[in-house]
Amino acid sequence: MAIEVRIPTILRNLTNDAKVVEGSGDTLGALVKDLDSRYPGIGEKLVDNGKLRRFINVYLNDEDVRFVGGLEAELSDGDNVTVLPAVAGGSR
């Protein structure tokens, strides 16, 4: 099962500067484990204590995974996963 994963600039040092990588897994959690086996360290950047990190947004086919099951979100062949760091800040 091939899942396309879009990697943000800040994590590309872990994917040899690749913007897009392929992974596999029946769930988002399994996909993260698969990616971590090929790109060591990426798992800890995405997951902490069994949950997605608070300041990382993950989208499955343009849906925020927090609303479709989180790490238990089911994946299908051909799905697209996008990882985005949360953006905050600004000034008055």
Image: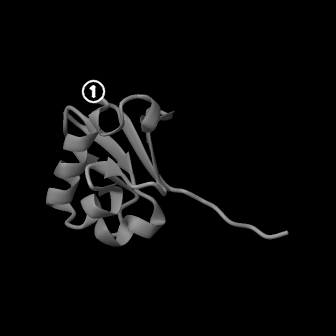
Mark 1, Cα crowd under 10 Å, few <14 / some 14-19 / many 20+, is: few
User: Residue lying farthest right?
Assistant: 92
User: Residue lying farthest front?
Assistant: 49
Task: Give the quarter of the image for residue 53.
Answer: bottom left
Residue 76 to residue 19: above or below? above
Residue at 44% x, 37% y is 66
Residue 37 to residue 57: above or below? below
State the image coordinates of residue 36 (x, y, percent, origin top left): 20, 58
Q: Toward the viewer: 56 or 77? A: 56
Relative to 34, 74 lies left or right: right
Residue at 26% x, 58% y is 43
Relative to 89, 58 lies left or right: left
Badge 1 amino acid: Ser
State the image coordinates of residue 58 (x, y, percent, origin top left): 43, 45
State the image coordinates of residue 59 (x, y, percent, origin top left): 45, 40
Q: Quadrant of the N terminus?
A: top left
Residue at 40% x, 58% y is 19
Relative to 39, 70 lies left or right: right
* Disc 1: which residue: 76
* Secondary structure found at label 1: loop
Q: Quadrant of the C terminus?
A: bottom right
The colouring scheme, among rainbow, by chain, secondary structure or one colour, is: one colour
Residue at 20% x, 32% y is 26
All told, the count of numbered labels is 1
